[in-house]
Amino acid sequence: MDIDIINLSKKYGEKEVLRNFSIRISEGAVTSVMAPSGAGKTTLLKILAGLEKADEGSVTGMEGSRIGMVFQEDRLCENLNAIANIRLVCDSRVTVPQIEKELRRVGLEGSERQPVRELSGGMRRRTALVRALLSPYDILILDEPFKGLDEHKKNEVMSYTLKKSMGKTVILVTHDEKEAKFMGGKIIYMNDNNYRTN
Ligand SMILES: Nc1ncnc2c1ncn2[C@@H]1O[C@H](COP(=O)(O)OP(=O)(O)OP(=O)(O)O)[C@@H](O)[C@H]1O
């Protein structure tokens, strides 16, 4: 089912973050949301994930769906290693060798048994991404998941993300149009409460 976001409005105190925001997100495809800082992207994702409540408007098409998410901040358990962080969320049938294989595919071989607090920003980001991709989800919500990666690694990780999420509904927030184009699908440009799609 497509997701219909209709006339969503949200204020924090006097600050209007979303006003009458309406878009359709196609089932089984990537939709990228692009906007400058502070335009309300994270707020939108939080409303979709049920972590914030909109003041007005509705979201349909997500009922009963399982959500996988990469948050704006990594939200990892700092003292656990990457494997243990991933095991916390994935199906118990996923084995450690399977997790190791996935971590290798994003270039984290050799670091998978270090507490994540010792990893670089980009390594932590990839850990959070693999964790979301291995969680049982129908809809994947990604808030700047490729932040902190150099161009070469970013392309590898984006290809990996596309392969792993094939056929699933993916909502990607990014500042980088190249990322949105690489991931394909619809691009939504949000700016000062004006919205347009490609
Ligand atoms: N819990 C909150 N309480 C008050 N204001 C908030 C809260 N969350 C966000 N805001 C404000 O709402 C606006 C939109 O924030 P949001 O994080 O959604 O933007 P964003 O587009 O994701 O920005 P960025 O690209 O910098 O992450 C900002 O001005 C922010 O300061």
Image (cartoon, rainbow, N blue to C red):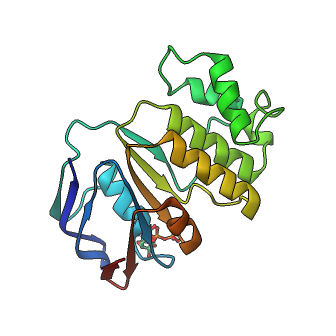
Residue 131 seen in the figure = yes
Where 61 sits versus 33, above or below? above
Direction from residue 17 to residue 133 in the image, left or right? right
Direction from residue 103 to residue 19 in the image, left or right? left
Where 65 sits versus 47, above or below? above
Seen at 81% across and 34% down, the residue is 111
Question: Which of 175 and 29 lies nearest the eye of the viewer?
Answer: 29
Seen at 45% across and 59% down, the residue is 172
Q: Quadrant of the C terminus?
A: bottom left
Residue 75 seen in the figure = no
Seen at 79% across and 33% down, the residue is 109
Where 49 sits versus 127, above or below? below
Question: Which of 119 and 96 lies nearest the eye of the viewer?
Answer: 96
Question: Which of 100 and 29 lies nearest the eye of the viewer?
Answer: 29
x then y, percent, for residue 37: 51, 76
Residue 107: quadrant of the picture = top right
Direction from residue 55 to residue 11 in the image, left or right? right
Seen at 53% across and 56% down, the residue is 72
Residue that extends furthest to the right in the rendered view of this protein = 110
x then y, percent, for residue 1: 20, 47
x then y, percent, for residue 100: 70, 26
x then y, percent, for residue 159: 60, 50
Where 90 sits versus 170, above or below? above
Question: Which of 28 and 41 lies nearest the eye of the viewer?
Answer: 28
Ligand 1 quarter of the rendering = bottom left
Total number of numbered discs in the rendering: 0
